[in-house]
Amino acid sequence: MPVLGMGGLFFRANDPDALSAWYKAHLGVGAGCVSDPAAQANEWVWMVQGGPMVFQPFAATTEYFAADKAFMINLRVSDLDGLLADLRAAGIAIITKAEWDHPDTGRFARIHDPEGNAIELWEPPNPQS
């Protein structure tokens, strides 16, 4: 199969520059960002670490995210508690629900960017547990 993974995520924004700056400042996501501190930064791309990614269409009637949004971003994270502490310190509202977390699938939290797009933060289960 020739497809190796996601090459990008493109979506509309009312203020693309401000939204891009918000993602870089609070999540370390976007052009010029690196997930691995040993990686070389590239001004055009976000250098991510390989790993699992869910690609799943949802029913048009789903209540899992807002009905007026066509997508929800899911970001795989390595230290959910640390990231949530940083987001709280920045005044960003966080939603957690005990039923979202499971030892087989990991832990989840949800935030929204300044334009109201849902961002699910996912810490996969630790294979050593």
Image (cartoon, grey):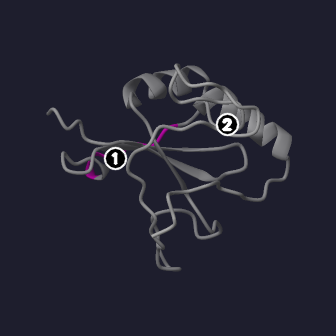
Q: What kind of element bears circle 1? A: loop
Residue 31 falls left or right of residue 69: right
Residue 92 falls left or right of residue 128: right
Residue 110 falls left or right of residue 40: left
Q: What kind of element bears circle 2? A: helix
* Residue 23, label in figure: 2
Instruction: Specify few, some or many for label 2: CA neighbours under 10 Å numbering under 14, 14-19, or 20 or more.
Output: some
Residue at 68% across / 38% down in the picture? 30
- Percent coordinates x, y for residue 121 in the rendering: 45, 43
Residue 37 falls left or right of residue 24: left
Q: Quadrant of the C terminus?
A: top left
Q: Quadrant of residue 128?
A: top left
Q: Quadrant of the N terminus?
A: bottom left
Residue at 39% across / 27% down in the picture? 79
Highlighted magenta segment, given as a residue range: 94-99
Kindly identify which residue carries mark 1: 97
Q: Is residue 80 above or below residue 67?
A: above
- Percent coordinates x, y for residue 34 in the rendering: 59, 29
Magenta segment main secondary structure: loop
Q: How many marks?
A: 2
Q: Is residue 102 magenta?
A: no
Q: Residue furthest left?
A: 129
Q: Label 2 amino acid? A: Tyr
Q: Which is closer to the viewer, label 1 or label 2?
A: 2
Residue at 22% across / 48% down in the picture? 102
Give me the C-alpha separation between circle 1 and circle 2: 23 Å
